[in-house]
Amino acid sequence: MGNVNARDPDYWNVPDDPGIRHTDWMKKLPDSMSVSKVSIPGTHDTMARTGDIIWSWCQSLSLSVQLKIGIRFFDIRCRHFKNGLPIHHGQFYEHCSFTDVMNTMTSFVKSHPSEVLLVRVKEEYKAAECTRTFCETVWLTLQNYRENIWLEENIPSFKEVRGKIIILRDFKRENNPIGIPYATLDIEDYWKASSYKEKWRRVKAHLDNTRSTTDNIIHLTFNSCTKGIDAPREIARSLNPKLYKYVRANQGQGRFGIIAIDYPGPKLVEYIIENNFKTNVNVYQKNNSVFSCVLL
């Protein structure tokens, strides 16, 4: 396997653009494959990078750059305010809206039709000055993107959702289906950690379990937490190298599922992606001959 030591920028990124590009990495995944079987790099509190208090920031990369480097899971948190959906991290406004997020994402999947984005949509902070429910406002907003979104509740194959955005609904459904219920995922999110050691123990246990199972359930591990007054970027600087070493040490030994990260470094993202093309799960039988996927 080689040395798993890494330079700080490999697993922890602060510059706005590390320069790597993995815009079409899902192209080599088979159409018949369930999206639950993939190792997917993601971001926790995806848009938390422009709030008025730097302590609340969780990312350094813009949504556009995250898409380009290969991130495919996004944690989108919307406040319901005046029948609109501004993006928030707690009380802090992130100077963009859910419409801005959807515009960027749909533009990306139209340009890269092999790709699939998984988007958790969660209500954040307290609603104010609204005449309808959060669910109604989300539903109305999504009608502008019907061609490029997956609103069904079942877990699809890649053939069904290439060029689409899968909504992971983390709010109460009222009438029409609005994506896969977030509560049906297998999730590790020990977000208020007693210690970094205990947080990492839980992350590792969840990843170990994800790798050992072959069920058709989406597994999601948050490699992020809060601890006292520590800022997210410093927490990431402690947790990300542990994740980096784990991902490298377990290449080709089962799926990782979705891993949501604060300040992900480019090499960490790369190794999560590469696992899809090294694991035995992704060697397929076709026309009585064996072939394997190759990462471009």
Image (tube, rainbow, N blue to C red):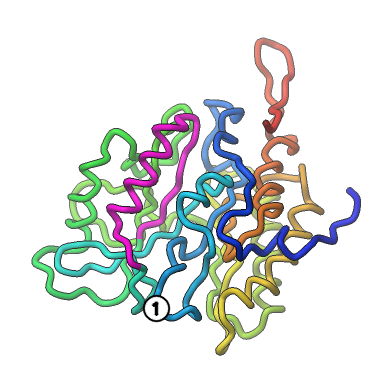
Q: Residue furthest bottom?
A: 228
Report the number of discs: 1
Q: Tag 1: residue type?
A: Asp
The residue positioned 58% from the left and 27% from the top of the image is 30
Q: Nearer the viewer, residue 78 or 212?
A: 78
Apparent side of residue 103 relative to residue 48 in the rendered image (left or right): left
Residue furthest left as drawn: 131
- Residue 101 lies in magenta, yes or no? yes
In this view, which residue lies farthest toward the top?
Answer: 287
- Answer whether residue 6 is magenta in the image: no
> For the residue carrying disc 1, how many other residues have a C-alpha within 10 Å: few (<14), some (14-19), or many (20+)?
few
Q: Nearer the viewer, residue 60 or 226?
A: 60
Q: Residue 292: name its quadrant.
A: top right
Which span of residues is magenta-colored? 95-121
Spot occupied by residue 87 in the image (x, y as percentages of width and height): 33, 65
Whole-percent x, y for residue 186 in the image = 52, 57
Q: Secondary structure at mark 1?
A: loop
Give the residue number, with chain letter if any, for mark 1.
52
Question: Residue at coordinates 71% horizontally, 48% vertically from top-left?
Answer: 271
* Residue 228 in picture, x, y percent from top left: 56, 89
Left or right of 230, for residue 166: left
**x and y percent of residue 20 in the render?**
64, 46
